[in-house]
Image (tube, rainbow, N blue to C red):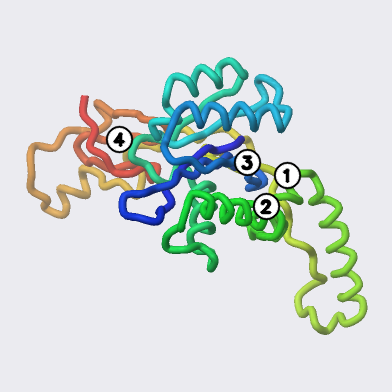
Amino acid sequence: MPRPTQPKLRGPAAWTWYYLYVLLDVFSRYIVGWLLAHRESATLAQRLIAATVAREQIAPGQLTVHADRGAAMISKPVAFLLADLGITKSHSRPQVSNDNPYSEAQFKTLKYHPSFPDRFGSFEHGRAHCTDFVTWYNTQHRHSSLGWHTPHVVHHGLAAARQAQRATVLAAAYAATPARFVRHAPTPPPVPTAVWINQPRLLPASGIRPDPAPIDAPDCPRIDDRRSRGDSGPPLVEPRLEPVIIDAGVWSRETRCSVNSVPLVSQTR
């Protein structure tokens, strides 16, 4: 599931910016497509997505593209292109920055790399730097969340063979000097089998979403508790009369307490 994003890079003078478009595979963190442009454009985003889908040989109905709410990504040309290619589109929630964590992490790696300059001397300089960075990021940069493999290894299905090689080396090291390993024989860190954006809360055993918790859960103050503490305020109304159910959380208009750790918001009908 690639995620297209587009940050700004400083040019040689004030108010000069270069726009970097990136398509990132969420599972492997592999940069499957990118381009640097002088402006933000729906046409450029359209061309990048079309070229990347053709190069990766993605069949209709196989891909979901998650993007931020930039003007280029929410434009009609991009939406029509995704529909024509049989690609499902998804966007970050309004004013929620952490709905794009994989791309944000990739751009932080770009901007915190020692070779990243304060400004680029020219457009060609920016393009050359991004070319070198993408090559390094895909083939040399190792991710802890990928079992310390590179995006190239995971994206091209080489992780299983590398895991077997690591297991062989670790087993030989343990057989040679078991005293070095205090607790148990070493094993290579696992490679993830799935990644999520806003993973739904599921019960571990059944895989079913939990039912809404009752209004008088321990984390939510009861009416009797408020009276015993002598809390002042408007006349108390039994919150069970009009519960407002949103997702897996039960909201009480009087106690204004979220039972299932959903961010606190006042809800009325």
Q: Which mark is residue 251?
A: 4
Which sits earlier in the primary sequence, circle 1 or circle 4?
Answer: 1
Q: Position of residue 95 (x, y in %)?
A: 33, 40
> x, y percentage for residue 109?
53, 58
Q: Are marks 3 and 1 in contact (CB under 8 Å)?
A: yes
What kind of element bears circle 1? helix
Q: Secondary structure at mark 4?
A: strand
In this view, 74 is above or below 191: above
Which residue is nearer to you in this view: 82 or 127?
127
Relative placement, left or right, of 32 versus 98 is right
Q: Of the residues shown, which amino acid type is indicated by label 4?
A: Trp
User: 91 or 242, which lies in front?
Assistant: 91
Q: Residue 138 shows which numbered tag?
A: 2
Type of amino acid at the residue the image marks with label 1: His
Q: Which residue is mark 1?
A: 155
Q: In the rendered structure, which amino acid carries the disc numbered 2? A: Asn
Q: CA distance from mark 1 to mark 2?
A: 9 Å
**Callout in the foreground (4, 2):** 2
Say which element carries label 3. Answer: strand
Q: Quarter-wise, where is residue 97 in the image? A: top left
